[in-house]
Image: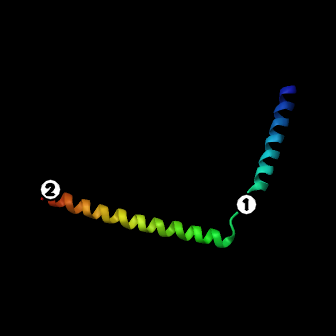
Amino acid sequence: MDKIRELSSETAQFAKDIENEAKRITWPSRQEAVKSTLAVILISGVFAAFLAGVDTVFAWLIRMILS
């Protein structure tokens, strides 16, 4: 029975610790979140275009070698 009470007490303390940590979080403003999201989308697009270019070049090279 003591083990159950101890576990319950530890669980309650853990939940309180989580709540205290969550209160310390500083969330970005809407403007910051939008800017960051657009930056990620832009960088992902540039990287995807780069990889598509590299893939096209390698595909062309392999076609040239095998033909």
Query: Which image quarter holds the N terminus?
Result: top right
Mark 1 vs mark 2, foreground winner is: 1
Bin the neighbour count of mark 1 within 10 Å (Cα to Cα): few under 14, some 14-19, many 20 and up: few
Res 1 visible: no
**Label 2 element class:** helix
Q: Secondary structure at mark 1?
A: loop
In this view, the residue farthest toward the left is 67
Query: Which residue corresponds to mark 2?
Result: 66
Q: Is residue 64 above or below residue 3?
A: below
Going 59% across and 71% down the picture, which residue do you hit?
35
Residues 5 and 29: in front is 29
Does residue 58 appear left or right of residue 39 in this picture?
A: left
Residue 21 is situated, as x and y percent measured from the top left of the image, at 76, 50
- Quadrant in the rendering for residue 12: top right
**Place of residue 39 in the rendered image (x, y in percent of width and height, measured from the top left):** 53, 69
Question: Callout 2: 10 Å neighbours few (<14), some, many (20+)?
Answer: few
The residue shown at (63%, 68%) is: 33
Residue 55 lies, in percent from the top left, at: 30, 61
Q: Height in image: 53 above or below 10?
A: below
Quarter of the image with the C terminus is bottom left
Which residue is identified by label 1? 26
